């Protein structure tokens, strides 16, 4: 099948967070549709010949870099023992996430991480499938802000070189 002729926009995306093995999930709703993902991949080093770049540059991959991402949503809740909230990832984790979810680093992992999966609708637009970008081992930070509406701004670092794309 040829490349899609339909430009995708924020109305086509869905963001879901899952724990280890996907036993628990949280679909992010009331969001701005501003999900952003940076994939720096590997650091590239340039090796000079006495300060000069050769006609064919001598470049090599060196250190792997983690991916980073951001998104914002409207603040609707803080924490509860009966259901997961986005805010619980920033506050501990606490509440339902803190007591029920298992980190993608394993039950004994020191750092709590989860998987962030961004699905972009494709089949409704004639594509062969929906488009999925999954970021593994995501550690969340962020901020809560009062306003009209009150918001939660999330940042994450995915300790993986590239996303899983299907």
Image (spheres, rainbow, N blue to C red):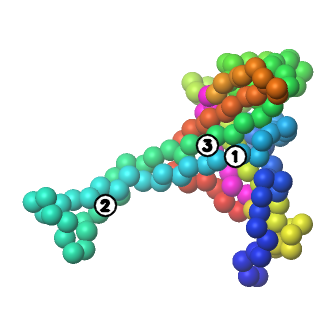
Residue at (56%, 43%) from the top-left corner?
68
Residue 60, numbered circle: 2
- Residue 69 got which mark? 3
Task: State if disc 3 and disc 1 touch (CB < 8 Å).
Answer: yes
- Seen at 62% across and 35% down, the residue is 155
Kindly check if marks 1 and 2 are in contact, taking CB atoms under 8 A apart as contact. no
Residue located beneath label 1 in the image: 35
In the structure shown, which secondary structural element does the residue marked by tag 2 occupy?
Answer: strand
Of the pair 149 and 83, the residue shown nearer to us: 149
Residue drawn at x 38%, y 52% as measured from the top left = 43
- The residue depicted at 78 percent of the width and 41 percent of the height is 32
Q: Residue lying farthest left?
A: 50
**Residue 11 in picture, x, y percent from top left:** 83, 54
Element at label 1: loop
Along the line of sight, which residue is nearer the eye, 56 or 147? 147
| Quadrant containing the N terminus in the rendered view | bottom right
Number of marks present in the image shown = 3
């Amino acid at each position: 099948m040829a490349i899609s002729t339909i430009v995708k926009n924020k109305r086509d995306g869905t963001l879901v967070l899952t724990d280890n093995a996907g036993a628990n999930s949280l679909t992010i709703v009331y969001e701005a549709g501003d999900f952003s993902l940076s994939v720096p991949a590997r650091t590239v080093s340039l090796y000079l010949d006495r300060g000069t770049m050769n006609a064919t540059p001598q470049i090599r991959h060196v250190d792997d870099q983690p991916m980073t991402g951001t998104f914002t949503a409207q603040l609707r809740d803080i924490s509860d023992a009966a259901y997961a909230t986005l805010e619980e990832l920033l506050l501990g984790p606490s509440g339902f996430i803190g007591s029920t979810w298992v980190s993608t680093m394993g039950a004994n992992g020191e750092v709590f991480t989860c998987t962030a999966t961004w699905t972009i609708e494709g089949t409704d637009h004639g594509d062969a499938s929906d488009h999925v970008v999954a970021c593994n081992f995501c550690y969340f930070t962020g901020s809560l802000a009062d306003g009209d509406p009150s918001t939660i701004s999330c940042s994450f670092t995915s300790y993986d070189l590239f996303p899983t794309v299907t």
